[in-house]
Amino acid sequence: MKLLYFAWLRERIGVPEEERDLPASVTTAHELIDYLSAQGSAYQAAFADRELIKVAIDQEHAALTASVVGAHEVAFFPPVTGG
Amino acid sequence: MVRVEEDDFDLSTEVKKITDGRTDIGAVVSFTGLVRDFQNNADTPKPDQGQMTLEHYPGMTEKQLEQIEAEAHKRWPLSASLIIHRFGTLNPGDQIVLVLTASPHRQAAFEAAMFLMDWLKTKAPFWKKETGPEGEAWVAAKSDDDAAADKWS
């Protein structure tokens, strides 16, 4: 699965995107965050405040409770501030 | 139409493109957003000392803006519309976003322009970072913007 990070999440994690094979136990965005948070201190710091994390699954906004099973691209980012 | 680009835009050129050769349009409403001086320190503006960098999610940005535009066309009888959003490094006073709506009568154009901006603010994946003499900071989202977007749902 392709994972993308934007704004301060990207800065804290240190890469804009990566490809990862996820364990079958990861089915929701919440579980994906749990999994990534266990991948080192940078991830842990980036995902520490879950209230500030938004997710897009295959380029559509989604809830953290949404399923990521079968998704090609999952992006994590803070609330948007364009306009 | 939706455009996501680094380059600046010209309002009158864009209006002409939309209205050229058409006689069914009775109203064109435009909204231009400008980079304000240091949103994090609104009380003490420091002209020419700050910059803003806009990051976005290529692919999703265009998709979201197209969806928002399609939604506006579903809700109001629009003859045409245009959304331009810039990214990259911008200075205070620079144009950052343009929304144009055209319709036979003014009410649809006014309402749709407001709707497009309200939804864009909460749905289009852009992030602003301010850089100044005292360092850099990501701009935080405002709950006012959520409330403005919610009133259209």
Image (spheres, grey):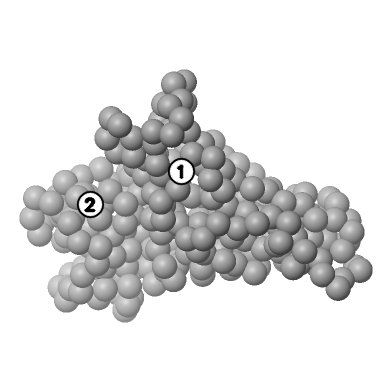
> Would you place residue B137 above or below residue B44 in this image?
below
> Which secondary structure, mark 1?
loop
Question: Label 1, on which residue?
Answer: B91
Specify the quadrant of the image occupied by residue A37.
Answer: bottom left
Work out whether residue A28 or residue B13 is closer to the camera in this orientation and state it.
B13
Q: Residue A9 carries which label?
A: none
Q: Which residue is drawn at 22% across and 57% down?
A: A33
Q: How far apart are marks 1 and 2 (CA)?
A: 22 Å
Q: Which amino acid does label 1 sit on?
A: Asn
Instruction: Name the residue furthest top.
Output: B43
Q: In what quadrant of the picture does the N terminus of chain B appear?
A: bottom right
Specify the quadrant of the image occupied by residue A57.
Answer: bottom left
In the image, B145: left or right of B107? left
Instruction: Name the residue furthest left.
Output: A40
Question: Label 2, on which residue?
Answer: A11
Q: Which chain carries label 2?
A: A
Q: Which amino acid does label 2 sit on?
A: Glu
Instruction: Name the residue furthest front.
Output: B48
In the image, B26: left or right of B52? right
Q: Which chain carries label 1?
A: B
In the image, B56: left or right of A16? right
Q: Residue at x 33, y 35 (%)?
A: B132
